[in-house]
């Protein structure tokens, strides 16, 4: 029974990683850059919802909508101000700018909201699921997180496959130059990708702090890195890969905490990542990049 | 053929860089002896040497070999802990400070180099961002494992545990040297500015010579065009491993200097986590890829700026971002 | 590009020389006996940015209140206090830099540092300079190795022993689980002593589960293990941020043991928007409770709220007491600001074992110090009842 509990909690944690990783993967696929600030957009999403719900006392739904809107705008603005001027610059310069943006967001949050931990009221009002005479309790947050991640995954896959914008995104990620020649507005497509990725980050942020309700300016940093690992794990650039990577990561993390060592859980997660990459250098579902000679 | 007093341009350039270091050392020593250097600056001298060595050594991997490494702080961690452990262990046995520090230095460098070779193995298969994440993962693993290590010594020998200090079962009078997350305390503070500068010079000379040698040209050719390099018979495996090992060894040296500067050593996300690796990378990128003097200047400037901007405490971190852009 | 970088280097060097002159000028002013200064320069160090910022900010603000009060009341023996706080980001190297910056400013007495690891590095430096140091919250025993360093808070081993004793004496439980932060000096320090003391007191530790600074939001595994092991009491030698998560997650799987913590849990009721019903019945050993009814505490809490808009935590109270302890030591020894740093150090550390201070963290009783630097004050067990700390 404990095993099932560990597993369910792992899947729940992994689902949050998966939604964050989805944002990472989409941005990477199109802009070919690691958006290190993604984790901090999550944190901003958490704070916005917190402000609306707890400080102003408005409905959680309004909080969620506001967080998505704010983060979407934030994502677009970050892209316009920080990343767009660097298009064509060396990947390292872009990477370092992204890290700079990450520090910037953390410190802005520290200035505005202060260092004190804020306890987040869960937006989920579904009752806990009690199974097997109270031996196994699955929290409402867990259920909602898992369902939300599945819905988002399906929606994103359909969006990319079926809509015009989605196909444009695919085209830009395949070959930017050719896409431009085909009449696709590359800049607009990249902006849309950032908008979607950041909107997803807001949802991930709300789910994260609903399950683990301690909100600080550094809340997003570690989940951000873990999600990055998850994205690479599943094959960066691939939507189902992000999902698989995220959930696997969450499950491995929780099971190794339970059965090996709670202190070494992170080391084990990272070790598994390295082993996977050794066997399959582009991640589980990553595309093999053929080398041109 | 024109001859410029028997010296080509890069040698000339290197001599200037070394000259700057020596000149800076002499000036600072004079200032210290006249008592006109602030306590802050005096305290920063050894850390500056640490960061300069780190930046130069990472430049070898990132600038010369062209592989993005986000785990450099991990090598530093290995060097710091291995050497601090040795120094604590032999504090009573070897009383000659310089001899003990020299041995600690070699131990730190060798241990870090071994880890560099271990990491070089996956590196051979991976590229780009996959490689970056692997090095980041290695760095985090090192930090995480160091945090659960307990090592103690007593009359019966050295004891090791991955659980807690009680698990060591030390005899009466035993001494826990590495206390998990509490790290190593009471490391003799053997390092000083003179040693730091000597190590900076050694690092520079070694790296400069590697770049100039045939090894360096082979490494650069791998960076510029791997396939072309391979097709003219350059052994890519060999050169990548060599580069990683040397780069790691010098990061280990920096770690030795770091751990013997403060009396306490713990592996926190701040000093040995990916944040530190990224900071070193920032030095390298801002200083210019493959540019030794640039790395040195960037490391010094970026370490000093936040310290001299302490009066704007809350806004300090925002500045770093501007620096990055 | 190279030229610009070179220019910057020159500028920085020039800057450091200028700063150096300023610093040394200040030194002669404060250490030289010829130019008598009429102010005590007290410096503070702690993390006010970064993940540990909450502790440093509490200390910074708490000490500021004490300094303002003392200055308004005429200072120490008629001398005003000049107070300056520097950030260390919870990093040993930064803390030493902060210490040197303060020395350049003219610091004579150090109130800091806030967290243990940086504190060890800094106290090695203060020992070299023989500077009098009072740490409000650096609780590791390694902090007070030098004879010039004194603690306001309980040391970690003492908290571990006191907790085990309290649990045994009041027969709270026989099967105990511990959830602690293995990457934190404070937490693992308490845990170690608790474990050995518990064993000798016949308390069985059925589960000892750790977490790390990088992995401290999901505690489902640790809680599940404690539950499976049948622990009646869960000992939490951790800070309250993680404790709020543990309480919430334990509640969501329907696990309701007795939770017992140390002073790190103090402040849990002050977490903004925290559902205090989750903390109902939590016991903790703490020297300070913001809800205490004595006038000193109430005044302090009111001033703190007015100035900083928050309820002060135990760190703020420790810092407030630290400043008053420094005041008491100065008054006892009759030290004056024109003494050199080392003379002040000798005078004040001689005075420390002789003074007794009633402060915020002593629960109305007097705090006294051993020459080793360790404080002696009574820990107080409180239980959270109806959303307030209630003394047992």
Image: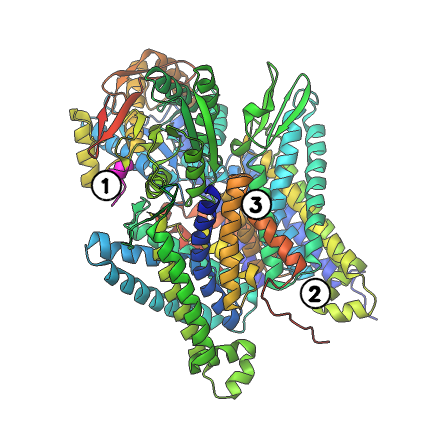
Q: Quadrant of residue C280?
A: top left
The outermost residue toward the bottom is A182
- Of residue B245 and residue A268, the one placed in the foreground of this image is A268
Judging from the image, what secondary structure is the residue with disc 3 in?
helix
Whether the magenta-drawn stretch holds residue C269 is answered as yes
Report the Cα–Cα distance between label 1 and label 2: 55 Å
Residue C107: x, y in percent?
A: 38, 31
Magenta range: C268-278
The stretch drawn in magenta includes residue C287? no
Q: Residue at x 33, y 21 (%)?
A: C172
Residue C310: assigned label: 1
| Left or right of residue C162, residue A57 in this image | left
Which of the 4 image quadrants contains residue A52?
Answer: bottom left
Report the residue marked by disc 3. Answer: A267
Helix, strand or loop status at disc 2: helix
The image quadrant where one finds the N terminus of chain A is: top left
Using the numbered discs, state the Cα–Cα distance from disc 3 to disc 1 in whole angstroms: 38 Å
3D distance between C-alphas at marks 3 and 2 = 30 Å
For this view, does A93 lie left or right of residue C240? right
**Residue carrying label 2:** B223
Left or right: B135 as drawn, with respect to C199: right
């Amino acid at each position: 029974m404990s095993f099932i509990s560990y597993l369910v909690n792992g899947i729940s944690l992994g689902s949050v990683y998966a939604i964050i990783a989805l944002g990472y993967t989409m941005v990477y696929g199109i802009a070919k850059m690691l958006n290190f600030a993604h984790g901090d957009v999550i944190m901003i999403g958490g704070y916005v919802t917190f402000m609306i719900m707890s400080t102003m006392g408005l409905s959680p739904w309004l909080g969620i909508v506001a967080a998505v809107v704010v983060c979407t705008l934030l994502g677009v603005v970050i892209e316009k101000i920080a990343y767009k001027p660097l298009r064509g610059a060396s990947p390292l310069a872009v990477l370092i700018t992204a890290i700079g943006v990450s520090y910037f967001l953390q410190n802005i949050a520290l200035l505005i909201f202060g260092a004190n931990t804020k306890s987040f009221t869960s937006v989920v009002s579904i009752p806990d699921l009690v199974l097997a005479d109270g031996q196994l309790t699955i929290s409402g947050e867990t259920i909602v997180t898992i369902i939300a991640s599945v819905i988002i995954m399906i929606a994103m896959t359909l969006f990319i496959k079926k809509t015009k914008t989605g196909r444009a995104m695919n085209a830009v990620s395949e070959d930017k130059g050719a896409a431009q020649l085909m009449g696709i507005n590359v800049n607009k497509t990249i902006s849309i990708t950032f908008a979607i990725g950041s909107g997803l980050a807001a949802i991930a942020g709300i789910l994260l702090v609903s399950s683990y309700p301690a909100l600080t300016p550094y809340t997003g940093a570690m989940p951000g890195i873990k999600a990055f690992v998850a994205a690479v794990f599943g094959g960066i650039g691939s939507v189902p890969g992000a999902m698989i990577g995220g959930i696997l990561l969450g499950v491995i993390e929780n099971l190794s905490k339970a059965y090996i060592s709670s202190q070494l859980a992170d080391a084990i997660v990272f070790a598994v990542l390295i082993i996977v990459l050794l066997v399959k250098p582009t991640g589980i579902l990553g595309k093999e990049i053929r080398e041109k000679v | 053929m024109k001859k410029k007093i028997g010296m080509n341009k890069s040698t000339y350039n290197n001599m200037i860089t070394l000259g700057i270091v020596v000149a800076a050392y002499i000036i600072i020593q004079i200032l210290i002896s006249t008592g006109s250097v602030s306590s802050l600056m005096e305290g920063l001298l050894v850390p500056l040497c640490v960061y300069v060595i780190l930046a130069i050594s990472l430049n070898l991997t990132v600038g010369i070999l062209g592989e993005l490494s986000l785990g450099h702080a991990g090598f530093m961690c290995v060097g710091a802990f291995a050497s601090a452990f040795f120094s604590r262990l032999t504090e009573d046995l070897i009383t000659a400070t310089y001899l003990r520090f020299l041995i600690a230095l070699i131990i730190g460098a060798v241990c870090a180099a071994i880890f560099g070779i271990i990491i070089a193995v996956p590196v051979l298969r991976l590229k780009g961002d996959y490689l970056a994440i692997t090095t980041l993962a290695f760095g985090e693993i090192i930090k995480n494992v160091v945090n659960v290590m307990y090592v103690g010594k007593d009359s019966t020998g050295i004891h090791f545990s991955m659980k807690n200090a009680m698990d060591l079962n030390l005899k009466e009078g035993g001494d826990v040297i590495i206390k998990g997350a509490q790290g190593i305390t009471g490391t003799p503070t053997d390092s000083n500015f003179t040693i730091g500068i000597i190590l900076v010079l050694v690092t520079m000379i070694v790296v400069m010579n590697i770049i100039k040698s045939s090894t360096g040209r082979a490494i650069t050719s791998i960076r510029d065009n791997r396939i072309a390099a391979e097709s003219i018979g350059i052994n890519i495996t060999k050169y990548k491993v060599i580069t990683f090992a040397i780069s790691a060894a010098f990061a280990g040296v920096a770690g030795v200097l770091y751990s013997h500067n403060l009396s306490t050593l713990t592996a926190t996300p701040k000093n040995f986590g990916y944040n530190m690796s990224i900071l070193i990378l920032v030095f390298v990128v801002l200083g210019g890829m493959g540019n030794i003097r640039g790395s040195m200047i960037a490391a010094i400037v970026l370490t000093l700026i936040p310290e001299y901007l302490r009066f704007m405490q809350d806004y300090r971190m925002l500045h770093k971002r501007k620096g990055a852009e | 590009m190279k030229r610009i970088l070179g220019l910057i280097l020159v500028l920085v060097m020039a800057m450091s020389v200028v700063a150096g002159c300023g610093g040394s000028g200040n030194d002669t002013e404060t250490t030289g006996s010829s130019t008598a200064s009429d102010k005590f320069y007290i410096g503070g160090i702690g993390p006010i940015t970064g993940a540990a910022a909450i502790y440093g900010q509490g200390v910074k603000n708490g000490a500021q209140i004490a300094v303002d009060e003392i200055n308004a009341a005429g200072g120490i023996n008629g001398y005003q206090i000049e107070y300056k706080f520097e950030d260390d980001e919870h990093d040993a190297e930064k803390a030493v830099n902060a210490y040197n910056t303060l020395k350049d400013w003219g610091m004579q007495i150090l109130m800091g540092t806030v967290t243990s690891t940086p504190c060890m590095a800094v106290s090695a430096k203060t020992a070299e300079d023989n500077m009098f140091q009072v740490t409000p919250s650096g609780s590791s025993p390694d902090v007070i190795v030098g004879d010039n360093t004194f603690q306001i808070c309980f040391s970690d081993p003492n908290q571990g022993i006191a907790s085990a004793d309290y649990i045994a004496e009041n027969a709270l439980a026989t099967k105990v689980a511990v959830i602690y932060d293995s990457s934190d000096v404070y937490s693992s320090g308490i845990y170690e002593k608790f474990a050995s003391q518990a064993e000798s007191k016949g308390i069985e530790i059925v589960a000892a589960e750790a977490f790390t600074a990088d992995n401290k939001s999901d505690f489902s595994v640790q809680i599940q293990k404690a539950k499976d092991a049948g622990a009646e009491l869960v000992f939490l030698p951790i800070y309250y941020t993680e404790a709020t998560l543990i309480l919430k997650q334990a509640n969501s799987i329907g696990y309701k043991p007795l939770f017992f913590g140390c002073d790190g849990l103090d402040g849990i009721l002050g977490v903004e928007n925290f559902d205090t019903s989750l903390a109902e019945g939590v016991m903790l050993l703490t020297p300070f409770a913001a809800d205490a009814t004595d006038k000193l505490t109430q005044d302090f809490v009111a001033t703190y709220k007015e100035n900083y808009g928050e309820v002060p935590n135990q760190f703020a109270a420790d810092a407030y007491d630290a400043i008053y302890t420094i005041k008491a030591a100065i008054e006892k020894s009759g030290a004056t600001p024109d003494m050199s740093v080392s003379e002040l150090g000798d005078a004040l550390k001689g005075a420390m074992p002789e003074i007794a201070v009633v402060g915020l963290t002593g629960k109305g009783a007097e705090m006294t110090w051993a020459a080793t630097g360790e404080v002696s004050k009574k820990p107080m067990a409180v239980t959270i009842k109806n959303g307030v700390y209630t003394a047992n």
